[in-house]
Image (tube, rainbow, N blue to C red):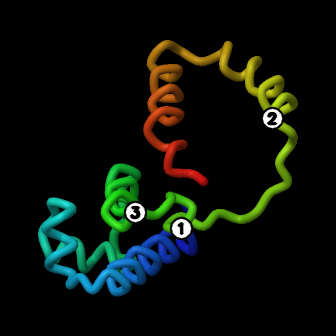
Amino acid sequence: MDKATINSVSQNIKKYRILNKMTQEQLAERMNLDTQYYAQLERGERNFTLEKIILACSIFHVGIEDIVVLPQVERPDNAQAIQQLIPRLETLSTSQLLLVEKFITEVLPYVK
């Protein structure tokens, strides 16, 4: 992620923390983080891991696109997108395919 996206993630998590009337200490505890470390994350001095972003989505009951705002890109229809993916998937190793499967099952459900 670029610096702007990282800052956006930090600010969005802060926004949802405040909307949910939580202190940094309370959210840090829910995320199993040290309070000072969490404060660095919120200030954008450190980067949230994907795992912690997903945890924040779960805590706040929001979709990942509410936390990670990506630039809009024109999307092909699903059939076309799948056809474009097949050749790429065929080149992946077993461990890479397992990572893709994990992404599909654990991250995509949070995308609206």
Q: Position of residue 55 (x, y in %)?
A: 32, 56
Q: Which mark is residue 66?
A: 1
Three-letter amino acid code of the residue under disc 1: Asp
The residue that label 3 is drawn on is: 61
Judged from the image, the secondary structure of the residue bearing numbered disc 2 is helix
The residue that label 2 is drawn on is: 78
Q: Position of residue 53 (x, y in %)?
A: 39, 59
Judged from the image, the secondary structure of the residue bearing numbered disc 3 is loop
- In front of the other: 15 or 96: 15
Q: Residue at x 34, y 50 (%)?
A: 51
- In front of the other: 33 or 76: 76
Three-letter amino acid code of the residue under disc 2: Asn
Q: Earlier in the sequence, mark 3 or mark 2?
A: 3
Q: Alpha carbon of mark 1 to alpha carbon of mark 3: how far?
A: 10 Å
Q: Position of residue 3 (x, y in %)?
A: 53, 71
Which quadrant of the figure contains the C terminus?
Answer: bottom right
- Marks 3 and 2 in Cβ contact (< 8 Å): no
- In the image, residue 64 sits, relative to residue 105, either above or below, namely below
Q: Position of residue 67 (x, y in %)?
A: 49, 67
